[in-house]
Amino acid sequence: MTKTLKIGGGAGFLDDRIEPALDILENADVDFLMLEHLAERTLALLQEAKRSGKAGHVANLRYRMETLLPPAAEKGVRIVSNLGGADPIGAAEVVRSVAAEKGLGHLKVAAVTGDDITELVRALDPILIETGKKLSDLGTPLICANAYIGAFQMKEALDAGADVVLAGRVADPALAVAPLAHHFGWGIDDYDKLALGTMAGHMLECAGHATGGNFADGGKRVVPGLDRLGFPIAEVDEDGVIITKTNTSGGLVDRHVVRQQLLYELGDPGDYQTPDVVMDISGVAAIDKGPDRVHLSGVRGSKRPDQLKVLCGVDNGWLGTAEISYGGWNAAGRAKLAGEIVTKRLRRDKKVSNLPLRVDVIGVNSVFLFGEPREDMLDARLRFCVRAPDQETAQHALAEAETLATNGPAGGGGKTQSLRRTIRTFATFLPRDQIQPEWQMVQ
């Protein structure tokens, strides 16, 4: 057993760029590649796809494995990912198929299941964190409920020799904790060590965030080579973790970038609860150790929670969006007038008069609501959004925005419309012993 384990963070969301993961495989000496692809609502969309007879795993799974599996296998790099989505077993079968096509049929592929507890949640009707009321009080259909499970089923699969491990909903940092626990032999009560692994996983889970993505600010905070942004690598020993990247990629790894990601979505820095451990980063030191190398140490851990977080996806109706541009002197003023016209017309239409509406002028008040148009703004784009219970009603509302071409202010054009079904997520907590994750090797 080596004293250091190196993990590459190869993805941070559903459709993340694949080139940085390939760069890590080709130009770094890593032991594992971690691929994190599931945002909060992504799994609900995949659950719906599975129930309608479509693939329940991440849609680009085959492409990603065709691209990444051969170089990973050549270097002996093992892959741990939540690409399994709503169907980890089906995803594992796809990976087995790709492996066979590439002459890699010897690779072992495992699937982790048990996070899908939709029927259990439907029966229990739990209290939701956001509302303080029962799930059923929402009055909208439950699409799915998935528990955030931890690292140890993935660890067991790695212990059994799996080269690729595919899960559904797992805590993002667990994708790094699993290979670290496997490599170093950590147990469920090695709290400080599990916290170290969780910190490493947290630094990798958003991929480009740890190398300068979402950090640059024009000439104020400069990140070199953002057009070829690399993804992070965690070099972990039992005393700390080095965050770095390949020297063939763009981006920046310094203590400022690293601290930004370290605090990202953390809540209380002294009480970050995961399925594997409660992490306390309040005493962590981030020290630059050379170009694109930052050392993190001082993390502490305590006993894992007795409850697991569960994410519930519910139907949130249809979202319709229409846009139109205005050009010339006072363009923003005419765009604002167009929004007022559409709003008044819809409020008189009994079919849609009670629907939630949002009207804003992009570049004026679409992010901060207090903005006002100026006469010297020579171009402006009006955006109109409506939420409806069904597709037909949403389309009816959008039709009114279409009439602005000849029934609104002067100088409008470039109309667009979009319509999509939406899902809203709510969280609850359930006792750990009610959720039984498991794993299997898929042949």
Image (spheres, helix red, strand yellow):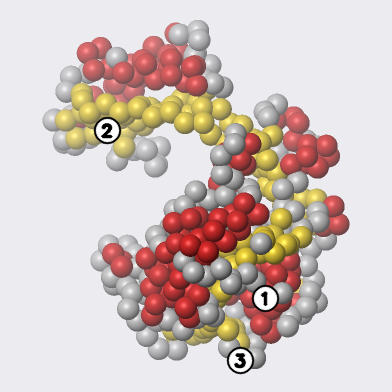
* Residue at the far left in the pictured view: 328
* Residue 140: x %, y % from top left: 67, 28
Under circle 1, the secondary element is loop
Q: Nearer the viewer, residue 365 or 4?
A: 4
Which mark identifies residue 381?
2
Instruction: Give how far apart the Cα atoms at labels 1 and 3 are.
Output: 17 Å
* Vertical side of 341 occupied by 251: above or below: below
Instruction: Give how far apart the Cα atoms at labels 2 and 3 are.
Output: 58 Å
User: Mark 1 or 2 closer to N-term?
Assistant: 1
Under mark 1, the amino acid is Gly
Under circle 2, the secondary element is strand
Callout 3: 10 Å neighbours few (<14), some, many (20+)? few
User: Mark 1 or 3 closer to N-term?
Assistant: 3
Under mark 3, the amino acid is Thr
> Is residue 318 visible in this depiction of the protein?
yes
Under circle 3, the secondary element is loop
Which mark identifies residue 161?
1
Callout 2: 10 Å neighbours few (<14), some, many (20+)? many
Q: Is residue 162 left or right of residue 188?
A: left
Q: Residue at x 77, y 58 (%)?
A: 437
Give the labeled residue for mark 3: 2
| Res 361 quadrant in image | top left
* Vertical side of 130 occupied by 115: above or below: below
